[in-house]
Image (cartoon, grey):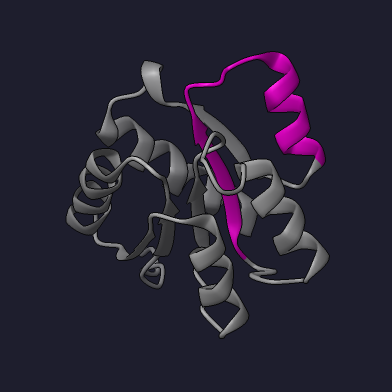
């Protein structure tokens, strides 16, 4: 008999409110505890104050700070050490994917080629693989 995994907690960071709401609904329906942030600086503050999601879903292109800059800050400040950081972007160049992985991302999902249920499935799968 399989043991039940503890509930996944996810922090979703995206400057597109429509997508943020859509992914939040999808992950909540998938049984996750969901927190969202429209602004990466606000998300960094949440982490600095002790938020410890086990998954961070992060857009790459945002106005105040890129997803790469956010990830660099998270790593530099040693925040959310146990979180699987997954980039979620329409930027799908190999250069961007390589950069994300070099910065310590656990995965990279291209928005345009994944419907929300696939994003949920891929994110949970990446986090589960990382736990092993």
* Region in magenta: 83-102
Asked if the magenta segment contains residue 89, the reply would be: yes
Answer whether residue 57 is visible to the viewer in this image: yes
Residue at the outermost bottom position:
49
From the viewer's perspective, tell me whether residue 129 is left or right of residue 125: right
From the viewer's perspective, tell me whether residue 48 is left or right of residue 123: right
Residue 106's spot in the image, x, y percent? 65, 44
- Residue shown at the point (74%, 60%) measured from the top left: 73
- Name the quarter where the C terminus is drawn: bottom right
Residue 72's spot in the image, x, y percent? 76, 53
Image height check: is 119 above or below 131?
above
- Name the quarter where the N terminus is drawn: bottom left
Residue 87's spot in the image, x, y percent? 56, 39
Residue 76's spot in the image, x, y percent? 82, 64
Number of numbered callouts drawn: 0
- Residue shown at the point (43%, 48%) measured from the top left: 124
Image height check: is 128 above or below 5?
above
Residue at the outermost front position:
64
- Residue shown at the point (39%, 16%) measured from the top left: 113
Observer-nearest of 131 and 65:
65
Image height check: is 68 above or below 90?
below
From the viewer's perspective, tell me whether residue 77 is left or right of residue 50: right
Image height check: is 131 above or below 123?
below
Answer whether residue 132 is visible to the viewer in this image: no
- Residue shown at the point (62%, 79%) measured from the top left: 48
Asked if the magenta segment contains residue 3, the reply would be: no
Observer-nearest of 88 and 61:
61
């Amino acid at each position: 008999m399989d043991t039940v995994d503890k509930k996944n907690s996810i922090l979703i960071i995206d400057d597109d409110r429509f997508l943020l709401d859509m992914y939040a609904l999808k992950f909540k329906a998938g049984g996750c505890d969901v927190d969202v942030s429209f602004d990466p600086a606000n998300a960094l503050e949440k982490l600095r104050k002790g938020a410890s999601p086990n998954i961070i879903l992060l857009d790459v292109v945002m106005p105040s700070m890129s997803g790469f800059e956010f990830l660099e800050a998270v790593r530099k400040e040693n925040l959310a050490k146990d979180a699987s950081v997954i980039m979620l972007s329409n930027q799908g160049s190999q250069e961007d994917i390589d950069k994300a992985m070099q910065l310590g991302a656990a995965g990279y999902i291209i928005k345009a080629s994944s419907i929300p249920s696939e994003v949920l499935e891929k994110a949970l799968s990446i986090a589960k693989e990382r736990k092993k």
